[in-house]
Image: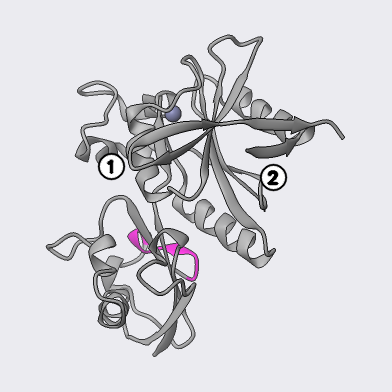
Amino acid sequence: MAVTILIPAPLRRFTNEQASVQVEAGTVGEALTKLDAQFPGIRDRICEPDGRLRRFVSVFVNGRDVRSLEGLDTPLREGDEVGIIPAMAGGR
Amino acid sequence: MIRLSRAHYEAIVAHARQEVPRECCGLLAGQGERVERVYPIANRADQAADLFAERDLMPRAGADPALLPTERYFMDPEELFRALREIEAQALQHLANYHSHPATPARPSRTDIEFAAYWPHVYHLICSLADPDRPDLRAFRIVDGQATEVPIVVEDE
Ligand SMILES: [Zn+2]
């Protein structure tokens, strides 16, 4: 499936400032592996060494958080948009 | 420097007041240094206890997650994603994040500084309601763990 990965501003230094990248992938996890093959190192910003999604990163398929879907196993269809954003958090 | 209209300034203060005793949070978008839109985002800190605990940034050992939004903020990821997409679709820039300190001064906390590591290219605004009659809105750049205050200019139209 050809899908589009939307790269958030804080990770564009890995993608030569490209805001989106096309890959062929059947799941979200596969899309991130393909992205890392093109832009080595970017997946370490998104996933823990054991492969889990980092807690401070959210990944979306067509705007839905994959934590409410099937995580990195969430299937992708032709034309889907995969979004990534680091948490915005803080406190007093 | 960051410039915002009186109406945007009032919108941020009103959002902070409306959420008391919880922290409010949101984004500011615009062009260059001028804010053109305020995007309030829901504070879901009650669902982010693990995120704070992992970094040893929980307010107190055993804090009740339901009370976390009074001392922490975590922007709802889906709302945040939609707002960032809309900002890009309108050819605006994401200029800043804002949040409130309902009872403490408008200075970045250790928690603010740690999480700002992912967003060094935006301003971080804090609206303090420590004196409820005199809201104090301040802006900071936070780069490599160092917070530097940046002047805010409120423009009367
Ligand atoms: Zn704060």
Q: Is mark 1 within 8 Å of ligand 1?
A: no
| Residue type, label 1 | Leu
Q: Earlier in the sequence, mark 2 or mark 1?
A: 2
**B149 up-or-down from B104: above or below:** below
Percent across and percent down for residue B127 are 57, 25
- Which residue is located at x 25 percent, y 75 percent? A40
Marking on residue B51: 1
Magenta residues, start to end: A62-68
**B152 up-or-down from B29: above or below:** above
Residue where numbered disc 2 is placed: B35
| Residue type, label 2 | Val
Q: Nearer the viewer, residue B81 or B110?
A: B110
Percent across and percent down for residue B19 are 57, 26
Q: Chain of mark 2?
A: B
Point out the quarter of the image occupied by ligand 1.
Answer: top left
Q: Secondary structure at mark 1?
A: helix
* Quadrant housing the N terminus of chain B: top right
Q: Is mark 2 within 8 Å of ligand 1?
A: no
Q: Chain of mark 1?
A: B
Indicate which label's residue lies in the foreground, 2 or 1: 2
Apparent side of residue B5 relative to residue A19 in the rendered image (left or right): right
Q: Nearer the viewer, residue A75 or A92?
A: A92
Q: CA distance from mark 2 to mark 1?
A: 30 Å
Bin the neighbour count of mark 1 within 10 Å (Cα to Cα): few under 14, some 14-19, many 20 and up. Answer: some
- Which residue is located at x 29 percent, y 23 percent? B59
- Which residue is located at x 70 percent, y 46 percent? B34
Q: CB under 8 Å between callouts 2 and 1?
A: no
Q: Looking at this view, name the residue that lies furthest to the right.
A: B157
Marking on residue B140: none
Apparent side of residue B14 relative to residue A20 in the rendered image (left or right): right
> Does the stretch in magenta take in A28?
no
